[in-house]
Amino acid sequence: MSPISAPFAADLDRARTVLREVFGYPDLRPGQDEIVAAVLAGEDVLAVMPTGAGKSMCYQLPALVREELVVVVSPLIALMRNQVAQMRANGVAAGALNSTTDTAEWRSIMDDLAAGRLRLLYLAPERLARPDTQEMLARAKVAMIAVDEAHCISQWGHDFRPEYRDIGAFAAALGNPRILALTATADEATRGEIVERLFARPPRVFVHGFDRPNLFLAMRPKAEARRQLLRFLDGHGGESGVVYCSSRRQTEELAEAFRAAGHHALAYHAGMDAAARSAAQDTFLREDGVVMVATVAFGMGIDKPDVRFVAHASLPKSIEAWYQEIGRAGRDGLPADTLTLYGTDDILLRRRQIDESEASDEQKRVERQRLNALVALAETPRCRRQVLLAFFGEESEPCGHCDVCRDGVETFDGTLAAQKALSAIIRTDQRFGEVHLVDVLVGDATERVVKFGHDKLKTFGVGKEFTKPQWRAIFRQMLALGLADVDMTGHGAWWVTEAGGEVLKGRREVVFRRDVVEAARSQGKKKSAKIDKKPSAAGLDEAGARLLAHLKSLRADLARELNAPAYVVFADRTLIEMAEKRPTGKTEMATVHGVGAAKLERFGDVFLRAIRDFEG
């Protein structure tokens, strides 16, 4: 980390004071100080920080320290609304202009702009091109533009959005105020395009660690996804979380199954009308214990800090997309769980989507590499966190906080099994899919096998030591290891790669994960896997847990009165600390994490009374 230059040390000290007094946080998080210092020094900045690392504070603090207007380009109306509510609860003048802004709110924002009181103005990227927006902000003297989810600018980013391309022109029309671009996932190619398209001046670039140590990482082969997910949810009763699905139909079916099992589950996908999507999103943001079952249409910009789990019913499209999606859990820094289910069909679907897309050949190549990295992560016998961080160019020791570290992984020499499978592919002229190849290996003389004379092949029945589900697991691992591939234009025909040829010739050994293959033997009958339950009460005793529940109920009532998410009142972490410390007066309450001056004045007495009454 570069040292903070003396002229701006005073500004950084002031920022820390504001952080304590306004937000109730004891100090800046690792990495925030140098970014805030660079912004306060008047520099343009591109910051790549992991989700939950406090990116928003990097523009909120400078706006307050310098008492200037910052325009925040944000992707979702609900996110803008909730961030404005959070800022106002902390006593900060903030507003948002979007399609839901009514006349009274618009006039209030205009008055604050004219008087120079407004510190943060949230806008959707689509609104930037409007002449009235540019005229209004030209008069308001915008000091900085903060661009959230900045990877959306780049065609190399995993969530490219064309309207983000207009931000650079918008900044130029305002006289090129300084820019702070923020994202959680941007590789070198993505960062390069962000710099080229967004900044008029060369920015300082900060790339901080990608590790989210509070997230438990787990990935499992898909057996019966519904049953596996219900078992996972059973370990998270009453907690908020997201279950991502690959199709609209799956979201509806799983949400219904979860509700039948007693969970407060909602569906969310792009096929729903806008009002229904908005209602579902508001319920998730405002209430505790809601399970959102969604496609990737849900999640961009979601800032709910107390999401305790994220599960994937199917494999995501890339390692960056997966990292972004699991990053929506545990943003408050407390422990959170992740679970990703995957199967061969998922891998083939994602490959077909890449091949059939309108992307350039080079971009398709990059997307295939990203997908392959995710498949390798799913099948790895090593610590998952080590493999994940290695993809982002970081090294780490085994984490002890993933399913591989916790449960251990046993491997076996799979060279012979791979040779049998690869031989079956070759002897059937590399023209058949997995189902047919497995039938040949286990000696199942189906009508199709007999029709093509494959029951006469030397490989017919040579793999009877494995069941059909086990062979499917072996084929998936061969795909992950690059020993074989699938012709998506040839009805799913498998073919042997150069690496697979080396295995067939005995020049390369193959190691498979025994747990993945053995799990497939009794697929559908496997007893419950261990649930690594993370109590959100963070070690509270029984009385403390009851007090926490009491404080959460009070918080919910106050949030309903405010028509705002519960965390706008206080985050879970704050309530847990209240239940631990049990402050008796405002002086003690002011030392609780997340209790700033405005919230202390507004909510302090009611929570202190609740604590006294509970103890009395």
Image (spheres, grey):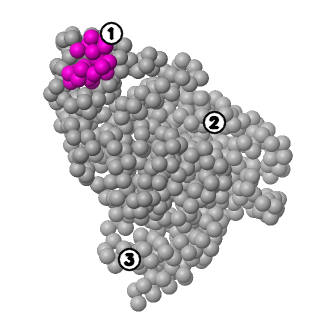
Q: Note whether 518 is above or below 22 in the view shown.
A: above
Q: Amino acid at mark 1?
A: Asp
- Seen from the viewer's position, the closer of residues 295 and 49 is 295
Mark before the other along the chain sequence, 2 or 3:
2
Q: Where does the magenta region start and end?
A: 436-455
Could you say where residue 124 lies in the image, as x and y percent from the top left? Answer: 69, 47
Taking the spot 61% from the left edge, 66% from the top edge, the residue there is 564
Pick whichever of labels 1 and 2 is earlier in the sequence: 2
The residue sitting at 51% across, 25% down in the picture is: 354
Tell me if I can see residue 372 in this picture.
yes
> Does the magenta segment cover residue 445?
yes
Indicate yes or no whether the magenta region holds residue 238. no
Residue 429 marker: 1
- What is the distance, in whole Å, between disc 2 and disc 3 at their CAs? 45 Å
Q: Nearer the viewer, mark 1 or mark 2?
A: 1
* Residue 539: image location, x then y, percent: 32, 67
- Residue 230 rendering spot, x and y as whole percentages: 36, 53
The residue beneath circle 3 is 546
Residue 281 placement: quadrant: bottom right
The amino acid type found where label 2 is placed reads: Arg
